[in-house]
Image (tube, grey):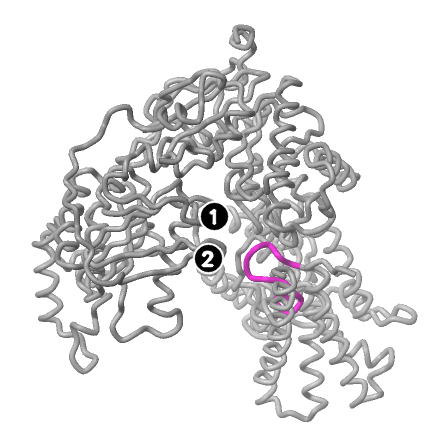
């Protein structure tokens, strides 16, 4: 391994710090990638994987620390591309309205001249049959006519392809998420060949088998820092999962063993292909865990729509929904705090279709005291509140209703720790009063508060953990394919 | 044979144009002549140019609500300055194109909704047009008149012009690499940005090209009408949007088709004549035109759904 250490650096990020508001996404992370190696990057939600990828490809400027390409300190998308850094993103980033060849033109600015179409076509065809021999993709078709797997293959092929200067580092962020095992195997074999020829690859994947078999070196991130950086041969699946979790942090259980009473208030089969059902009993806090984007939000939406209907509102809503993305589908940004709070329960607050101001103000006052919304006047605009307090209002909006089930779509993202503790307190008291909470969270501390946890992977339930089984190690093991089961 | 989604998008506008044309010929066989065709499609030329301009704006996911007043303004410039002192006229029109490019920059840099900015600009263009020509008047420059009334052998000038417009914009928007990049901005702005392109520059280029085609629309219109008026082309805002949609374009996603847009403009013009031949009173014509639009769009949605079902199977 020594000769690799002396090889030339392709990219080096040193002491990088990035903060989004109160959240520290990267807290002094170091990542050096040298020529001729495949680095595996693993970590749980919020560990900072995507952030460091964005720093390396120039899309994000770090608040502290340096980025150098080939020993030369530089910044920005243009600089990183000039130094041969290419990136295949987790969400597909082709233009769906363009053909395969036209997308290659967008990605490769050196495809110029009158014959660029022919050149681009030849390039993609060549690269596709190099990586995925035997593929059946028609390179002249528009990207939106391709299947998801084909689009991913095209994107990978375009990124590895080169007109004049070959890519030196290709970042693959979950490249196999929509490929079947055979195609994934072809890709991993190509990555190994590419690395042997002197290129480097940064590989991010939730399938630990891929990481272990393909990488030369594995970097483990946690809480915005690099916690382990060792040759792949020194890791096994189990030690990798352990490295991602915290070493010793088993909190004293404040969970009281709750006796399930009666029938499940909710029982739903989410995936027609598996028989695992999502169930919830009265007074339970059910957690949905797993890596972000593995079907948790979709599951919540499916549950919500199946109960409340898409077309016509039901008279007595059975469920309330607390949105995760405040700006996108949470707050009414032009309304006052009070109106934001009461909007879900207007029917109960009105007589003869007219909203009773007195009753609305009374409800607002009660909830302001109960959840301590920090404002002198509930008629102030919602945006005058801090993010955490806005989130509290959204919580109150759901709790004011008579719904017995509350669905939460990772609502505590970017909320400060003090507010979180207050909300946890309210959750517990509401649950003991008989309400059921179904809570998708990307944070381990919140998952540990739950009575029962479903771990999602690839859009399906991968494991169900109850009571004392809910530990970070178990959740991690179930989130990563090939992880050690309990 | 498997058709690409782009080809399917072109089938419906072409078919609806053919059906309308057949209906017109059936009702009025005398339209099936050199003069008849020219009369039917004469007014389609400026509309087609304005539709192309609108399509360029729509290809970067924006919408231009000032198209009608801008074309009126350029028509007024054509009928006054371009006719009396060509140098100043060309300078004004070039300035108008530069203003369009600047609009693209402002919309992108300040992240403003294009609808609001162009709606505001429509009053500016409208005001400038009234300042130039407070009452209808002016005259068409001789060369413009000559082009628009030319009599090429066999095929009338309206058809020749439409084919030239469709072919040249097809080359520009669908085949050239600038066109690819502009449509890429509409399809997935983030990925174009990540590939190292300047979105500001691309948006400015799209707006400038739109301004250029809108200027051509104004000039062509004056060539037909021989004089101008500040309100001459107000309908063009909605006609151009309808033309793009009718021709298979979409409001978002960079899905546009120049050939389709020209066909859409021809269809809209023909729809007006068709309704006159049907002896439908002008009061009802706008409603009937809307009905035609709805029928064509419904057909397209139906085809899209069929296609999706095919894909899922």
Q: Nearer the viewer, residue B84 or A336?
A: A336
In the drawing, does residue B123 fall left or right of residue A387? right
Q: Is residue B245 magenta?
A: yes
Quarter of the figure with the C terminus of chain A? top left
Q: Nearer the viewer, residue B173 or A344?
A: A344
B276 up-or-down from A67: above or below? below
Which chain letter matches label 1? B
In the drawing, does residue A123 fall left or right of residue A382? right
Toward which corner of the image does residue B150 lie, by quadrant?
bottom right
Q: CA distance from mark 1 to mark 2?
A: 9 Å
Residue B117 numbered mark, or none: 2
Residue A350 numbered mark, or none: none
> Can residue A65 be seen by looking at this rendering?
no
Q: Nearer the viewer, residue B97 or A109?
A: A109
Kindly check if marks 1 and 2 are in contact, taking CB atoms under 8 A apart as contact.
yes
Both marks 1 and 2 on one chain: yes
Residue at left 57%, top 30%? A86
Residue under circle 1?
B106
Q: Residues within 10 Å of mark 2 (few under 14, many from 20)?
A: some
Residue A358: x and y, percent? 9, 71
Q: Residues within 10 Å of mark 1 (few under 14, many from 20)?
A: some
Residue B258: x and y, percent? 70, 59
Residue A450: x and y, percent? 24, 45
Residue at left 80%, top 76%? B38
> Can residue B129 be seen by looking at this rendering?
yes
Q: Is residue A313 magenta?
A: no
Which chain letter matches label 2? B
Residue at left 40%, top 53%? A276
Q: How many discs mark residues in the rendered view? A: 2
Residue A271: x and y, percent? 45, 56
Q: Which residues are magenta?
A: B243-256
């Amino acid at each position: 391994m020594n000769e690799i250490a002396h090889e030339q650096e392709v990219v080096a990020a040193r002491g990088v710090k990035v903060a989004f508001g109160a959240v520290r996404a990267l807290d002094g992370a170091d990542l050096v990638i040298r020529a001729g190696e495949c680095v595996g990057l693993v970590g749980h939600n919020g560990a900072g994987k995507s952030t460091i990828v964005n720093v390396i490809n120039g899309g994000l400027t770090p608040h502290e620390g340096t980025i150098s390409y080939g020993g030369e300190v530089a910044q920005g998308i243009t600089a990183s591309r000039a130094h041969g850094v290419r990136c295949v993103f987790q969400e597909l980033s082709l233009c769906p309205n363009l053909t395969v060849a036209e997308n290659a033109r967008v990605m490769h600015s050196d495809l110029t001249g009158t014959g660029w179409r022919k050149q681009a076509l030849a390039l993609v065809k060549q690269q596709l049959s190099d990586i995925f021999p035997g593929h059946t993709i028609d390179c002249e078709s528009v990207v939106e006519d391709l299947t998801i797997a084909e689009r991913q293959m095209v994107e990978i092929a375009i990124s590895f392809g080169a007109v004049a200067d070959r890519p030196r580092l290709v970042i693959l962020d979950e490249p196999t998420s929509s490929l079947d095992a055979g195609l994934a195997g072809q890709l991993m074999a190509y990555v190994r060949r590419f690395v042997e020829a002197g290129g480097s690859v940064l590989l991010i994947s939730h399938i630990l088998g891929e990481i272990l078999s393909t990488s030369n070196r594995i970097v483990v991130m946690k809480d915005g820092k690099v916690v382990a950086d060792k040759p792949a041969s020194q890791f096994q699946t189990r030690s990798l999962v352990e490295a991602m979790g915290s070493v010793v942090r088993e909190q004293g259980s404040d969970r009281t063993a709750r006796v399930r009473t009666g029938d499940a208030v909710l029982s739903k089969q989410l995936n027609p292909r598996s028989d695992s059902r999502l169930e919830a009993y009265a007074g339970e806090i059910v957690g949905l865990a797993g890596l972000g984007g593995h079907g948790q939000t979709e599951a919540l939406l499916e549950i919500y729509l199946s109960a409340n209907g898409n077309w016509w509102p039901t008279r007595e809503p059975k469920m309330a929904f607390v949105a995760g993305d405040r700006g996108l589908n949470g707050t009414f940004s032009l309304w006052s705090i009070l109106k934001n709070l009461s909007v879900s329960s207007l029917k109960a607050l009105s007589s003869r279709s007219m909203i009773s101001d007195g009753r609305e103000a009374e409800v607002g006052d009660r909830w302001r005291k109960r959840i301590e919304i920090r404002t002198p006047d509930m008629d102030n605009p919602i945006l005058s509140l801090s993010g955490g307090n806005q989130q509290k209002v959204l919580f109150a909006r759901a709790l004011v209703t008579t719904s017995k089930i509350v669905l939460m779509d990772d609502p505590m993202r970017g909320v400060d720790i003090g507010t979180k503790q207050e909300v946890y307190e309210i959750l517990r008291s509401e649950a003991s009063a008989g309400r059921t909470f179904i809570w998708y969270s990307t944070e381990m501390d919140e998952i540990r508060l739950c009575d029962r946890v479903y771990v999602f992977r690839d859009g399906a339930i991968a494991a169900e953990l109850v009571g004392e089984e809910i530990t970070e190690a178990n959740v991690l093991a179930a989130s990563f394919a090939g992880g050690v089961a309990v | 044979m498997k058709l690409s989604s782009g080809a399917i998008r072109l089938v419906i506008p072409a078919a609806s144009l053919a059906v309308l044309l057949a209906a017109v010929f059936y009702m009025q066989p005398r339209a099936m002549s050199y003069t008849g065709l020219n009369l039917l499609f004469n007014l389609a030329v400026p509309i087609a140019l304005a539709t192309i301009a609108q399509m360029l704006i729509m290809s970067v996911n924006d919408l231009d609500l000032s198209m009608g007043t801008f074309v009126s303004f350029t028509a007024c410039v054509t009928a006054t300055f371009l006719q009396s002192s060509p140098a100043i006229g060309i300078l004004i029109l070039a300035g108008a194109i530069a203003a369009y490019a600047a609009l693209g920059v402002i919309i992108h840099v300040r992240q403003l909704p294009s609808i609001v900015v162009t709606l505001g600009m429509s009053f500016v263009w409208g005001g400038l047009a009234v300042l130039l020509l407070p009452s209808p008047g002016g005259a068409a420059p001789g060369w413009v008149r000559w082009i628009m009334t030319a009599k090429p052998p066999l095929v009338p000038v309206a058809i020749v012009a439409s084919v030239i417009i469709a072919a040249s914009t097809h080359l520009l928007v669908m085949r050239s690499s600038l066109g690819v990049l502009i449509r890429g901005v509409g399809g997935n702005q983030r990925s174009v940005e990540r590939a190292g392109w300047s979105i500001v520059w691309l948006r400015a280029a799209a707006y400038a090209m739109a301004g250029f085609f809108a200027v051509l629309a104004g000039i062509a219109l004056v060539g037909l009408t021989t004089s101008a008026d500040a309100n001459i082309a107000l309908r063009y805002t909605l006609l151009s949007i309808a033309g793009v949609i009718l021709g298979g374009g979409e409001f978002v996603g960079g899905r546009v088709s120049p050939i389709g847009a020209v066909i859409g403009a021809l269809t809209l013009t023909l729809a007006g004549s068709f309704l006159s031949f049907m002896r439908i009173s002008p009061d009802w014509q706008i409603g009937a035109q809307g009905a035609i639009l709805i029928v064509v769009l419904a057909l397209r949605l139906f085809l899209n759904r069929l296609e999706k079902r095919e894909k899922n199977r």
